[in-house]
Image (spheres, rainbow, N blue to C red):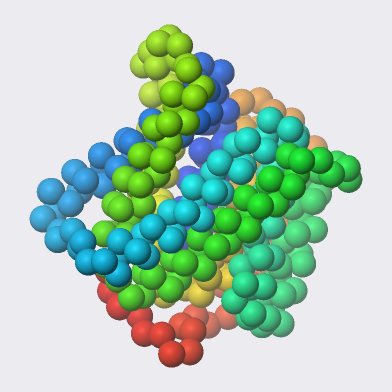
Amino acid sequence: MPRLALLLTTLIWGATFPATKAALDQIPPLSFLFLRFFLGAVLVGVWFVVVRHRLHRERAVLSASAIATVFLFLGYVLQTVGLRYTSASNSAFLTALYVIFVPLMLRRFDARVVLATVIATVGLWLLVKPSASMNVGDLMTIGCAVAFAGHIVCLERFTRKFDAPSLLVWQMTAMTLLFVPAGFWEQAPASAFVPTAVLLIGLGVTGGLATGAFAVQMWAQQIVPAQQVALVFASEPAYAAWLSWYFLGETLDSQGWVGSALILIAVVLGAFGTSVQPPAGETIQPA
């Protein structure tokens, strides 16, 4: 069940790509990220009020949230800025390399997961067809992949020790505050914030649905090992390509279909083909 939930979560992550791409025709990227996380923080706050869940403010919870937020913020900033200097295909491929970085960070090299990681990497290459050249944008995007891998590793550890909803609300709040200066730096015109249908849909998908997906991820990571989470998330570019093909009319050739199929095979092999065991010495606590 948790891994199926993660697979559905990844579908929502994939939907954020065409939704964000359409919204960025109207609003600059960092300003959009501010609105996205602001909406997410508000929705999570409303959930706390409605269900009367206690918000944990202990120093350990705040410290864990701060550490996770650093990785999350660096991931988004490096990815967004890197896109100014590299192609979208290179960005998609390099970002998804967290599927390799997560097991490297944790030093977990299960044979089945290693095989699945290789298959997923080949599939990613076929799907997005990145260029062989390397520039500063590519280096930033590799840094983004490392940051996102660090965030996945953090969530595995912290969601098993602390209250997951509290970790979520503190991260969403911190991300909102961190993007406030970025919005002023961009100096977006007032017209960029006009509530058009495209902008509202983009925020609904990224700030609404994606925030719910983030909550599901934090719940699932109390149970599913981080390297399997990374493998499931490797299907995000495939979902993004399919949804962009269907809704935005973008082309997807036979090589892309083969690549996306290999990614899904890798997900089934690596994330659904092994039993879930928590890391040694850690206990699983409910959120």
Report x, y in % for residue 251. 74, 30
Q: Is residue 207 above or below residue 67?
A: above
Q: Is residue 166 above or below residue 224?
A: above
Residue 31 visible in the snapshot: no
- As drawn, is 163 to the left or to the right of 282? left
Q: Quadrant of residue 164?
A: bottom left
Report x, y in % for residue 34. 41, 33
Q: Residue at x 30, y 53 (%)?
A: 170
Closest to the observer: 70 or 205?
70
Report x, y in % for residue 97. 69, 57
In which quadrant is the N terminus drawn? bottom left
Q: Is residue 89 above or below residue 4?
A: above
- As drawn, is 231 to the left or to the right of 49? right
Q: Residue at x 41, y 40 (%)?
A: 178
In which quadrant is the C terminus drawn? bottom left
In this view, the residue farthest toward the bottom is 281
Report x, y in % for residue 100. 69, 65
Q: Is residue 274 above or below residue 28?
A: below
Residue 85 visible in the snapshot: yes
Q: Residue at x 81, y 40 (%)?
A: 135
Tally of numbered tags: 0
Q: Residue at x 44, y 59 (%)?
A: 68
Closest to the observer: 283 or 75?
75
Q: Quadrant of residue 223?
A: bottom left
Closest to the observer: 217 or 178?
178
